[in-house]
Amino acid sequence: MIFDDRRCELGEGALWHPARKQMFWFDILNQSLLSQDQDGPRQWRFPELVSAAGWVTDDVLLIAGERDLFLFDLESEEIETLCLLEQDKPKNRPNDGRADPFGGFWIGTMGKRAEARAGAIYRYYRGELRQLFGGITIPNSISFPHGGAFAHFSDTVTGRVMRVGLDAEGWPKGTPETFLDLTAEGLNPDGAVVDASGVLWLAQWGAGRVAAYAPDGSFLRAVEFDAPHTSCPAFAGPNLSALICTTAQEGMDAAARAAHPNAGKVFVAEGIAKGQPEHQVIL
């Protein structure tokens, strides 16, 4: 089922704001934040590429841009820079990001042309931005099971979703280990979210689906959507039981776009699982 019929070039960063009861997502290549609520569709355009957000207050989002992490007031539309992000790398942009259970915010960066190993994954926490992992080509799958014992992330080109333990303040400890190896199936891990039972819901770019994996990594099921490039899932709605998924048209030629007229739209599947509330960013 289609949740929003606006066609994004590169839909990403799906976020259900638990206080506002409002769905947000990004069209990275069109420099836009989009939303859908009871008053209908909304859109905000920015002077830079934007890709992911976390909620700070009812009205303020932390947004990842290509030059900085900034605070954006949804009502006044005022912008305040929180910290700089890769100011020395103008050929890079942000990609996948999500708030963690400790009030921190993880954000991945990558080359605008997906140059090999040009990006990294960072964490902002209580005023500090720290690089966690370097040499990343396409950062994705940033997600956190309830309790904050560990984090997931991926570099899409490797075909693997990694898992790393977290310390008492949410910083990674130890060496990341492979949680899912999808290389034999030729699947491309994209955005991910973990539900209340610990199941990982993983968008798979090029496969037109979000696949569910148990905490031990075993495949459970997949939810199919009518667009090949599924990019980022989120749980939404009053009971957090609706699975929302952004999609993209990026990389599709005219024939592919004609063959997939719903590519780039945002989809919803109702009654799928019980999600976790999105974590609040603590400044």
Image (tube, grey):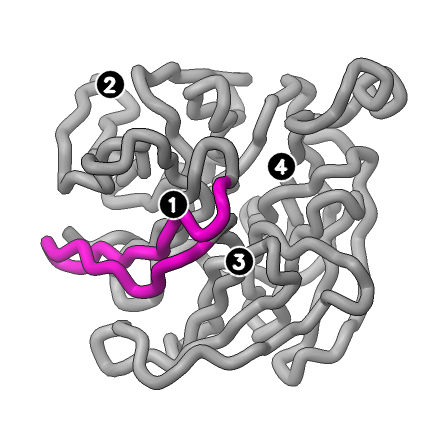
Pick the residue in front: 52 or 5: 52
Residue 192 position within the rendered picture, expressed as x and y whole percent measured from the top left: 57, 56
Residue under pointer 1: 109
Give the image location of residue 120, x and y in percent: 36, 54
User: Does 156 sit above or below residue 25?
Assistant: below
Which residue is found at the position 68% from the left and 30% from the top?
Answer: 3
Give the amino acid type for the residue marked by disc 2 in the picture. Glu
Disc 1 packing (10 Å; few <14; some 14–19; many ≥20): many
Disc sitting over residue 77 in the figure: 2
For marks 2 and 4, give the CA distance: 24 Å
Distance of label 1 from label 4 (alpha carbons): 19 Å
Q: Local crowd at mark 4 within 10 Å, few (<14), some, or many (≥20)?
A: many
Q: Which of 153 and 7 is in front in this view?
A: 153
Left or right: 73 with respect to 126? Answer: right
Question: Callout 4, which amino acid?
Answer: Thr
Look at the image and give the residue range highlighted in magenta.
Answer: 115-136
Check disc 3 and give the amino acid type: Asp
